[in-house]
Image (cartoon, grey):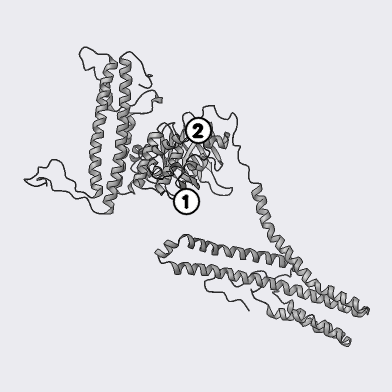
Amino acid sequence: RPVPVLPGAEWGGVVPGFGPACAPQPQACAVGSLPIVPAIHLSAPHTLPSAPPSMLPILGHTRAQNTSEPRRHLTSTAQTTVREVKRLDSISRSPIYTSVGEALGGLASIRAFRAERRLLARTGRALDGNVVMSLANMSANRWLSVRLESLGALAAAAAALAAVEQRGAAALLGNILSSALQITSLTNMTLRSASLAEVSFNSVERVLEYSEPPQEAAAVVPGAAPRRWPSRGALAFENVTLRYRPGLPLVLRGLSFRVPGGTTCGVVGRTGAGKSSLINALFRLVELEGGRITLDGVATDTLGLAQLRGAMALIPQQPVLFTGSVRFNLSPFAGHSDAALWAALRHAHLATAVESSPLGLDMVISEGGAPLSAGQRQLLALARALLRPTKVLILDEATASVDVETDALIQDTVRREFGECTVVAIAHRLQTVIDAHNVLVMDDGLAVEFGSAAQLLAKQDGVFTDMVRETGPASERMLRALAEQAADAVHLAVPARSGGSHLSTRSVDLLASPPPSPGGASPLRALGTHSRELMAAAGGAAAQLKKALEGLEALATGEEVYEAGGEEEEGGGTPRSHAPRPAPDGVAARGDALSAQAALARAAALVQEVSSMAQRAQRDVDELARGRPGAQWDGL
């Protein structure tokens, strides 16, 4: 009779290969009666002629099975059946272990959402599936035992008949019967051992597979790169194609773009566009199918893996922290002093959190990064990147899982500390890369758009424009304003390696205007005067942005904001011409205010950077004007 399948079981009650998954009790009874029949006939020799007919029904019952398929050999059938059933039994245990592990790891969430019954039902279905396969396993063993007992009984009967015909001594007859009865157990043990050995060889196959993996490229290739490579950090993708395994579709399909050295390139795209595959190709985690990638003119496939990966720094979305101290996580190979570690923590805005611990750099970080928050773990990964001398920094959605404040801290540190490096930032938030020098828009493994954010937003039907529109009207206005500010900032200053500076129209007019004194001062001194004017203008812009920040902070915290220009009434603080405007209510308004606040904070930092550059230019010009050249002309 078939085994009843428990409700919700994922496995059927029929196991292919040996009929219904049942416990063959009638066959066991028949096998148990086999030794009795020869004993009866031996005790009464006159009944021996009737022995074969009396055993035919029993033998026929024990050999009854599905005749729709051709008969297969007993040993091959047994080995195949036992092996497959054991495999299914092992597979059916995995859902149980998974369900128990998830329950232990998510007890708080399960209780909070009252999902106990749902989890119990899922675990019950997994247990039912395992019980069904366990019954099938036991049935397969009983199926084999029935056949082996039948063979043993036949051997014992044949031995008994031969002994009676020979009429030998009683001792010889006893030895023959004893040996014949042991055939069953020996055959059973032999077949079980063979099946177990065959199943165990699956582990041997895995060991052999992992002991001979595909060989990776060499760690170091002597002479593959110049001595001071990389010097600029210029990246170039030339018709790059990539697939993860033979037979799988291409994830990068002819990707081509260039990132000049020292610039920032943002990479955006929808899910599945190939952004993470770009990083895998750059670090050679997966070898290219076609095309090539160059870093400062050197093809990456000609370099050793240690050479290539050592020339770049990566800050992933989920930072990897090891169980140990802060010192160990910052410098696993103890290659930096404590002073350098503290400096990196200060630049990453994490020194205060580490100093609050009495252990300092020896503060213990447990599994999962505790006691650090998600944002602090990301800042620790940033500090680790600061300790690594590099010309290329890769940000793999480094700010996607942190709050707006931590995002602003990371962006500020990247702009300040990696200003001379090439930065490739894969971003989930568009405002993270809106001020990048170039933005790469990917779709289905291809580069569909490439250029500055202002250039891409000028295309009304562009992919990047559609992505900006999907963020909402308020966010779209903010992103467009940031893109325009970034475009204006490009005109203010570019790295000195280009041989000069690109200035805005107003700055060019100032520098090209005639000297202020009619006596005709030297051009260098006039340039110094004009640079002071430029510095003053930048300082005024910074002051205006500071005022805007104060107003936005009040708006974000819910305080009342008064419009300037109103006259106070007698004895009151409310303006006469302008009524107080309360902060807008709702999460959306607060989010817009916080986003605008973060955007203006970045703009203020940019203007302050321009101001400091103007101060340095003023000092250089003054040195030249006094006849003591203290700077190179390209610096000027």
Residue 420 horizontal side relative to residue 128, left or right: left
Mark 2: few, some, or many residues within 10 Å (few <14, many ≥20)? many
**Residue drawn at (61%, 37%), measured in percent from left and top?**
218
**Residue drawn at (46%, 43%), measured in percent from left and top?**
362
Residue in front for this viewpoint, 440 or 202: 202
Q: Residue furthest top?
A: 519
Rendering coords of residue 279 (x, y %): 49, 42
Mark number, residue 237:
none
Residue for badge 2 = 295
Under mark 1, the amino acid is Gly
Quadrant where the N terminus sits is bottom right
Under mark 2, the amino acid is Leu
Q: Are marks 2 and 1 in contact (CB under 8 Å)?
A: no
- Quick one: SS at disc 1? helix
Q: Establish if 446 lies above or below 49.
A: above
Q: Residue furthest front?
A: 358
Lower sequence index among marks 2 and 1? 2
Q: Establish if 212 lies above or below 114.
A: above
Rendering coords of residue 224 (x, y %): 58, 30
Rendering coords of residue 134 (x, y %): 62, 70
Kindly tell me whether residue 447 is visible in this rendering. Answer: no
Viewer-side label of 2, 1: 1
Q: CA distance from mark 2 to mark 1?
A: 34 Å
- Quick one: SS at disc 2? strand
Residue for badge 1 = 368
Residue 100 horizontal side relative to residue 489, left or right: right
